[in-house]
Image (cartoon, rainbow, N blue to C red):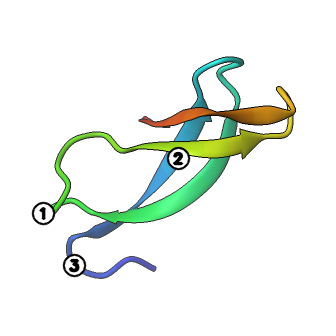
Amino acid sequence: MAVGARTRVILACQECKQRNYTTMKNKQNTPDRIEMMKYCKFCKAHTLHKESK
């Protein structure tokens, strides 16, 4: 499991609001929520995914 400042975060699609991906981030280096362009299998397109709670 995560050790130290690295934590697991969930990425949610901004179009359909589905939670599709999990990733790790370092909370000390990136305290803000992360945003990535990822493929959503529900929208069948590359969409913006943001970190959700």
The correct choice, above or below, for 8 with respect to 3 in the image is above
Residue at 71 percent across and 18 percent down: it is 16
Residue occupied by mark 3: 4
**Cα distance in 3D space between marks 2 and 1:** 18 Å
Residue beneath disc 2: 10
Tell which of 47 and 26 is nearer to you: 47
To which residue does mark 1 refer? 28
Instruction: Give the answer, above or below, for where 16 lies relative to 23.
Output: above
The residue type indicated by label 2 comes to: Ile
The vertical placement of 37 against 15, above or below, is below
Residue 51 falls in which quadrant of the image? top left
Q: How many marks?
A: 3
Specify the quadrant of the image occupied by residue 6: bottom left
Residue 37 percent coordinates (x, y): 56, 42
Amino acid on which the number 3 mark rests in the picture:
Gly
- Mark 2 or mark 1: whose residue is earlier in sequence: 2
